[in-house]
Image (cartoon, helix red, strand yellow):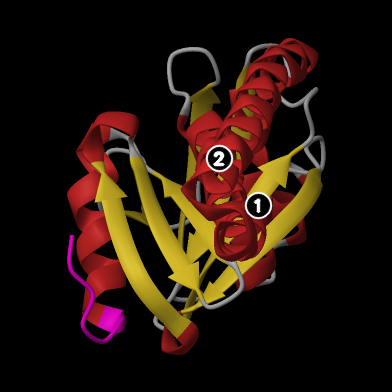
């Protein structure tokens, strides 16, 4: 691996970018599922306001109570379906989610690896990226076995909120309309969190 090892899994590459690989155990760490639930609960709350408040003015508290029950029941059904969907997704991914992260003074990038990629291949992709940074085609070629699926980028200047959940190894880096999740092992967590906080104005854990 080209680069300076700054923590157990984080490397500072020659191009000034920090890179690391995280293997996300989808059954042991339900952070993704909790994020889905949070969005669903917010949607239900909005429905209560949009539907319940007008009903309260026309039918009184009885109408509001009925609307709330319907929305709550619907929300519970959706949550139950989301659990089943999450288990199916986790099984499809082989019960793990492989992520490569890149971080510099301006941004942090969440790069999802394809489901077939093993951790060794993901580290190979990290080596490939470092090889490109140094112009080394030999080093770059060693990482071509891995491939990315999608990316999510958070520009620190646009980030409004940083929240950390150490138990789930996740740092939420939230822009106005784009929420990103950055994962790090215990040995790397403090370094990554502090790096992000120092570059986001007013960020607190």
Q: How far, Cα to Cα, is label 1 from label 2?
A: 39 Å
Residue at numbered disc 1: 111
Residue 200 located within the stretch drawn in magenta: yes
**Residue 7 in view in this figure:** no
Residue 169 located within the stretch drawn in magenta: no
Which residue is at the front of the view, 91 or 59? 59
**Residue 5 — which label?**
none
Choose top left, top right, bottom left or bottom right for residue 9: top left
Seen in the picture, residue 84 relative to 147 is either above or below; the reply is: above
Picture coordinates of residue 101, whole percent (x, y)? 53, 53
Residues drawn in magenta: 199-205
Picture coordinates of residue 71, whole percent (x, y)? 63, 37
Marks 1, 2: nearer the viewer: 2
Picture coordinates of residue 14, whole percent (x, y)? 47, 70
* Residue occupying the point 52% across, 39% down: 65
Which residue is at the front of the view, 171 or 83? 83
Left or right side of 94 for 30: left
Mark 2: give few (<14), some (14-19) or many (20+) Cα within 10 Å: some
| First in sequence: mark 1 vs mark 2 | 2
Choose top left, top right, bottom left or bottom right for residue 125: top right
Q: Secondary structure at mark 1?
A: strand
Magenta span: predominant SS is loop
**Residue 68 — which label?**
2
Q: How many marks?
A: 2
Q: Secondary structure at mark 2?
A: helix
* Residue occupying the point 61% across, 53% down: 59
Picture coordinates of residue 149, whole percent (x, y)? 81, 46
Mark 1: give few (<14), some (14-19) or many (20+) Cα within 10 Å: some
Which residue is at the front of the view, 153 or 36? 36
Which corner quadrant holds the C terminus?
bottom left
Q: Are marks 1 and 2 in contact (CB under 8 Å)?
A: no
């Amino acid at each position: 691996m080209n680069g300076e090892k700054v923590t157990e899994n984080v490397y500072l590459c020659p191009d000034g970018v920090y890179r690391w690989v995280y293997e996300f155990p989808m059954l042991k760490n339900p952070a993704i599922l909790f994020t889905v639930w949070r969005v669903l609960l917010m949607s239900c709350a909005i429905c209560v306001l949009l539907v319940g408040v007008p009903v309260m003015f026309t039918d009184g508290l009885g109408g509001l109570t009925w609307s709330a029950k319907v929305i709550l029941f619907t929300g519970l059904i959706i949550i139950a379906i989301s659990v089943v969907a999450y288990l199916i997704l986790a099984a499809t991914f082989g019960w793990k989610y492989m992520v490569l992260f890149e971080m510099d003074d301006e941004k942090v990038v969440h790069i999802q690896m394809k489901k077939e990629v093993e951790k060794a291949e993901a580290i190979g992709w990290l080596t490939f990226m470092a090889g490109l940074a140094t112009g080394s085609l030999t080093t770059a070629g060693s990482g071509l076995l891995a491939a990315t699926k999608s990316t999510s980028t958070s520009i620190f200047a646009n980030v409004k909120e940083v929240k950390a959940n150490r138990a789930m190894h996740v740092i939420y880096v939230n822009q106005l309309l784009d929420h990103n999740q950055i994962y790090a092992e215990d040995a790397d967590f403090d370094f990554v969190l502090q790096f992000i906080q120092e570059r986001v104005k007013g960020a607190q854990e």
